Image (tube, helix red, strand yellow):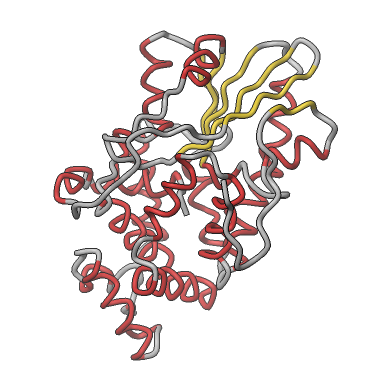
Amino acid sequence: MGSLLLRLVCLFLALSVLAGQALAGDVPRSARPALWTVEAGAGRMYLLGSIHLLPPETQWQTPEIRAALAASQVFVFEAPIHDANDAMARFVERHGRLKDERLRDLMGRDAHDKVSKAAWKVQYPPRLLERLRPWLAAIHLELHASLRLGSSPHYGVDHVIEQMATKRQMRTAYLETVDEQLSNFLKLSRNEEIAYLNATAAGILTKPDGPRELLEAWAVGDVSRLEFLIDEGLAGVPQLKALLLTARNRKWMNAIEGMLETGETHFVTVGAAHLVGRDGLIGMLRARGYKVSGPAVDALPPGTRSLR
């Protein structure tokens, strides 16, 4: 999913040390992620899609990105990460654990067996999932799939930019709170939660290179391929895309338009999935008549691959 939620969970569980135990494998060393520029009167905004957990080898600060960072006055992120551990802990304790049930009680035997196999595949003991609600179990599996690639939140794009902004004593702004972000999972029905977990397990078992494919598409700025992979991963859980991507994008647009009206230069860093496709922030900005420079964002037809 490429969600900031993975980074939040990773920080909460203090698991970034596992990145050093990742499986060996090629990851992009040099990245040129897509960057968009929006102009509105005297206002300017740069939008960069983040991969929230990255391998240390992946260098993504191109001259274009560095120039945009240097020219910006306000740095915008999805949600505040500093001091997020307490908020995450409280939320998980209230809403992330099963009460009188176990995960195996909620799923058929075959589905539970697949989840267990997926957990072993990403080197996470299945028994540790048993008391988690299905949505949180799915996040744990996604997290460990990324960690096995050698990724860590310490090298994530948003973390690096946030650290840079703090060092430069620049102003920061956020599009939502940690609780607002996590609360989206509570809008899923139990069946939708289980479908999300099933889809996550199936992806790990049938497409173990999924995290690497997403990273590679992002690294070459192939937004069409990136959206195709995101849609493919969420195909079994359309409600999840509606809640985590489309609805949040629409909500964020009010804040983004307000920023453009200030006449200042903003640098917006959000998960790459929020920027691609017709319902992404770039598509919405263009549909509202804003002048946007950067790649097109239309998705590829199903079953095709980008040639870029």
Residue 138, how many percent across, how many down? 39, 65
**Could you tell me which residue is drawn at 41 percent across and 29 percent down?**
60
Which image quarter: residue 85?
Answer: top left
**Could you tell me which residue is drawn at 17 percent across and 43 percent down?**
17
In the rendered image, the residue lying farthest to the bottom is: 109
Which image quarter: residue 232?
Answer: bottom right
**Could you tell me which residue is drawn at 36 percent across and 55 percent down?**
92
Residue 124, how many percent across, how many down? 21, 64
Q: How many labels does the image show?
A: 0
Q: Is residue 95 left or right of residue 279?
A: left
Q: Is residue 221 left or right of residue 94?
A: right
Residue 167, how many percent across, how many down? 36, 11
Q: From what the image shows, is residue 2 above or below residue 126?
A: above
Quarter of the image containing the C terminus?
top right
Which image quarter: residue 76?
Answer: top right
In the rendered image, the residue lying farthest to the left is: 21
Q: From what the image shows, is residue 98 above or below residue 110?
A: above
**Could you tell me which residue is drawn at 34 percent across and 65 percent down?**
208
Residues 303 and 281: in front is 303
Q: In this view, does 278 lie to the left or right of 92?
A: right
In the rendered image, the residue lying farthest to the right is: 289
Residue 198, how many percent across, how many down? 43, 76
